[in-house]
Amino acid sequence: MKFIFNTFLSLSFCLLFGAITSFDLVESKIYICKGKYSKKYHYSEKCRGLSNCKSSIEKVTLKDAKNIGRSLCGWED
């Protein structure tokens, strides 16, 4: 019985930790170029992929960037 309880406790901890980590990733801030044809997001404001941005650079959540169709910049793979 103790083995089952310990296994359940360990599994619950892993699931909880995974959910918290996933939530933090989605809520983390990333950078996008607000240009008309921009399609990527960047983890760093100094990313090489943002060097050609002719309009403003905005800090948004990863969730928001994905909702507007952005994908990860090729320089940050």
Image (spheres, rainbow, N blue to C red):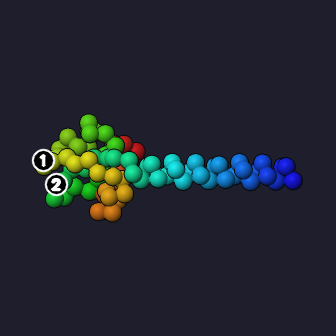
Instruction: Choose between 55 and 20: the one closer to the eye.
Output: 20
Instruction: Choose between 15 and 38: the one closer to the eye.
Output: 15
Rendering quarter of residue 8: bottom right
**What residue sits 29% from the left and 51% below the top?**
60
Q: Which residue is mark 2?
A: 35
Rendering quarter of residue 51: top left
Position in image of residue 37 (x %, y %):
19, 58
Position in image of residue 53 (x %, y %):
17, 46
Tell me the crowding category of disc 2: few under 14, some 14 to 19, or many 20 or more residues within 10 angstroms, Cα based: few
Position in image of residue 26 (x %, y %):
41, 53
| Chain-order first, disc 2 or disc 1 | 2
Inspect the image, locate mark 2, and give the three-letter code of the amino acid beneath it: Gly
Inspect the image, locate mark 1, and give the three-letter code of the amino acid beneath it: Lys
Q: Residue furthest right?
A: 1
Position in image of residue 44 (x %, y %):
31, 39
Q: Which residue is mark 1?
A: 54
**What residue sits 62% from the left and 53% below the top?**
15
